[in-house]
């Protein structure tokens, strides 16, 4: 009865998160209520209090590492943005040809997303498109390519997507292996849709649109902050390899260095208060951090109860080939948030049966990271672009979803041709 109650509560919470907009209730609130509710139910299972508290403490320790990493990374990105460091990207675009611009935007987004999170990258790139593309239809096509490129680019590095970061911090993957194994599949996932979309973007941009390109220079110290911030993010995997300390320690090192630098650089200049790290911290999206906290703790309660292990066993009986299971998880991530999907996968399969860098974990990173591109509501990148450009759900389904699915499937097939479980 308790197990059934836990499952029903989790499904109800999941439904509430999916229906966030119709219900007018923030998904973070639902996730936090879900987490507390799941652990309350679990505590009523008759096991000793010490066992319940020990399980909660263990999961909280694992979750805290992910949350501190995200907080540090988001703070660094906010510091770069406040110094207008991303404005340098505008200067990279010098073409009037729409097809060339499509590929240029796609590749810039792909590589930028590999070192930033795909949400921030999408905001930066759509803001760029608004400056250089005046036609609404052309901009919607280009913005849809940003969604695909941001998700594909985030999947192949340990710091590019929150789900890949979860697998990395959880010891399921290592930085060099995931980059080596997923770079080509992720690139294929991008190239296939771009190749198809090239047929829908023809001609040249109007001169008047190009004349709108932003001439705004970065804030004082902007270029240095950009270099220092990007270097801090890239250094995290190196830091982990050299010290064997958790990744969140590496990201906190970067935050500390940037904090010290900006305090010294802007010392005595009251007009630059908005450029200091304290100001950047006030703009960090704490709602997203608390959402991850709620979801991961709720999944932890299911794991402690043994529900995820039973689910894994059931899926193994239904599908003997785990490649099918992982592929389906990727499709589900187009409808359901990929954070709980990956968290569930980490609870379903253990490191004893599937050690670090096993093909199962790498496929999970790829599928959960890129499958969300199939629907515009399937990823944080899609949701933010949908809001910024007012792209309709069914327009995306009609014009983009099939090509995103083709790219997702092509990348998946490329991966399994390179590896076996």
Image (cartoon, helix red, strand yellow):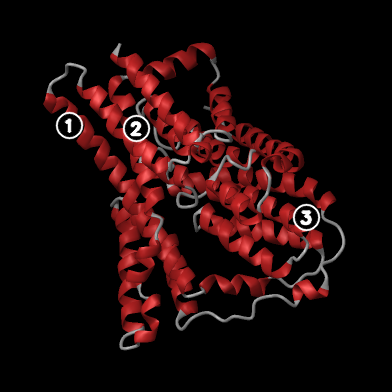
**23 or 418: nearer the viewer:** 23
* Separation of marks 2 and 1 at Cα, in angstroms: 20 Å
Comes first in the chain, label 3 or label 1: 1
Q: Which residue is mark 3?
A: 137
Q: Look at the image and tell me in which quarter the N terminus lies.
A: top left
Q: Report the residue that reaches farthest toward the bottom.
A: 268
Q: Say what secondary structure mark 3 lies in.
A: helix
Report whether residue 124 is seen: yes
Location of mark 1 (residue): 54
Looking at the image, residue 179 sits to the left or right of residue 99; the answer is left
Left or right of 136, for residue 331: left
Please report the residue visible at 78 percent of the width from the left and 55 percent of the height from the top. 137
Front position in the image: 285 or 406: 285
Residue in the image at 56% along x and 25% along y? 323
Q: Could you tell me which secondary element the residue under label 1 belongs to?
A: helix
The residue where tag 2 is placed is 34
């Amino acid at each position: 009865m308790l197990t059934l109650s836990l499952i029903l509560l989790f499904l109800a919470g999941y439904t509430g998160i999916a229906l966030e907009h119709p219900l007018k209730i923030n998904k973070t609130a639902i996730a936090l209520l879900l987490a507390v509710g799941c652990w309350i139910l679990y505590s009523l299972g008759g096991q000793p209090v010490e066992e319940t508290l020990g399980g909660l403490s263990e999961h909280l320790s694992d979750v805290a590492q992910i949350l501190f990493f995200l907080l540090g990374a988001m703070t660094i990105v906010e510091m770069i943005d406040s110094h207008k460091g991303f404005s340098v990207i505008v200067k990279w675009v010098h073409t009037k040809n729409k097809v060339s611009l499509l590929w240029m935007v796609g590749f810039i987004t792909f590589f930028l997303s590999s070192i930033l999170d795909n949400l921030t990258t999408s905001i930066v790139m759509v803001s760029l498109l608004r400056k250089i593309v005046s036609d609404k239809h052309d901009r919607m096509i280009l913005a849809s390519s940003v969604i695909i490129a941001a998700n594909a680019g985030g999947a192949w590095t340990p710091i590019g997507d929150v789900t890949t970061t979860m697998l990395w911090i959880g010891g399921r993957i290592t930085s060099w292996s995931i980059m080596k194994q997923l770079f080509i599949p992720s690139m294929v996932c991008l190239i296939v849709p771009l190749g198809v979309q090239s047929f829908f973007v023809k001609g040249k941009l109007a001169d008047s649109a190009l004349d709108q390109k932003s001439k705004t220079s970065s804030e004082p110290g902007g270029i240095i902050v950009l270099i220092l911030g990007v270097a801090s993010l890239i250094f995290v995997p190196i830091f982990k390899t050299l010290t064997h300390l958790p990744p969140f320690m590496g990201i906190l090192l970067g935050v500390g260095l940037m904090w010290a630098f900006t305090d010294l650089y802007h010392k005595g200049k009251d007009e630059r208060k908005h450029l200091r790290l304290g100001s950047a911290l006030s703009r960090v999206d704490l709602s997203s951090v608390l959402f991850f906290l709620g979801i991961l703790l709720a999944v932890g309660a299911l794991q402690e109860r043994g529900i995820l292990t039973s689910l894994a066993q059931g899926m193994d009986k239904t599908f003997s080939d785990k490649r099918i299971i992982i592929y389906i998880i990727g499709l589900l991530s187009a409808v359901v948030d990929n954070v709980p999907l990956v968290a569930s996968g980490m609870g379903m399969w253990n490191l004893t049966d599937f050690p670090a860098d096993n093909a199962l974990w790498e496929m999970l990173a790829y599928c959960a990271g890129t499958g969300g591109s199939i629907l515009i509501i399937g990823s944080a990148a899609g949701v933010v672009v949908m809001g910024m450009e007012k792209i309709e759900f069914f327009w995306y389904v009609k014009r983009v979803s099939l090509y995103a699915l083709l790219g997702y499937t092509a990348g998946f097939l490329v991966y399994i041709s390179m590896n076996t479980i």
